[in-house]
Amino acid sequence: MEGLDSTMIAVSIPAMADSLGESPLRLNLVITSYLLSLAVFIPVSGWIADRLGTRRVFCGAVLIFAGGSALCGLATNLPVLIAMRIVQGFGGAMMTPVGRLILLRSFPRDLLVSAMNWMTIPAMVGPMVGPIVGGMLTGYASWRWIFFLNIPIGVLGGALAWWIFENYRAPAPVRFDIVGFGIAGLGLFLLEFAIEN
């Protein structure tokens, strides 16, 4: 879902810019804000999963991603779209690492490679078909459907994950390093800002 979404957006930028009355160059912020949110929150995902449980965090992340997608599809201006992409990035940052953590804790070592393939193959196929799906949705419906597509996928995926997986929690989670998180987040933001400008 995450890989499909990222590549669908790239081909829909001109239509999004036209619909929102913005320059296509300004819509680069739609991609950048998502990637920055992803980079900032991935390091936190393991700590949150240890504290709240892997199944709960994964299902919550899928629903946050799908909810952020729905709000992106409803956005009527660029600032709202950027804000909702940040929400999507938070959900995406929890999905992939916690999904892998669930697999590591759910399968014995001899079945782990096979289980990882079930996660890796869709993650590789999504970016390949994303431009095709994104182009078709944008051309035949609207750019908003590249976001609305994530809603049924997210609801179904979240429900299946809740039903299939156990909720693993760390017995004694470590204390959260808020200073390190703040410094890393600020550093990533400044680096991205410098690259963009």
Image (tube, helix red, strand yellow):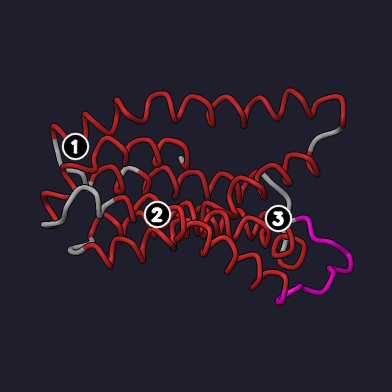
Earlier-in-chain disc, 3 versus 2: 3
Task: Write the start and end of the magenta stretch as one range.
Answer: 168-179
Q: Secondary structure at mark 3?
A: helix
Residue at 19% across / 37% down in the picture? Answer: 138
Which of 77/160 is in front? 77
The picture places residue 124, in percent across and down from the top left corner, at 53, 26
Q: Secondary structure at mark 1?
A: helix
Against 183, residue 50 (above or below) is above
Q: Verify whether residue 19 appears in magenta.
A: no
Residue that carries the numbered disc 1 in the rendered image: 138
Residue that carries the numbered disc 2 in the rendered image: 196
State the separation of the CA atoms marked 1 and 3.
35 Å
Q: Secondary structure at mark 2?
A: helix
Q: Nearer the viewer, mark 2 or mark 1?
A: 2
Q: Quadrant location of the C terminus?
A: bottom left
State the separation of the CA atoms marked 2 and 1.
26 Å
Q: Nearer the viewer, mark 3 or mark 2?
A: 2
Please name the amino acid that badge 1 sits on: Thr
Residue that carries the numbered disc 3 in the rendered image: 54
The picture places residue 89, in percent across and down from the top left corner, at 48, 56
Please name the amino acid that badge 3 sits on: Thr
Q: Is residue 21 left or right of residue 9?
A: left
Against 116, residue 98 (above or below) is below
The picture places residue 161, in percent across and down from the top left corner, at 60, 46
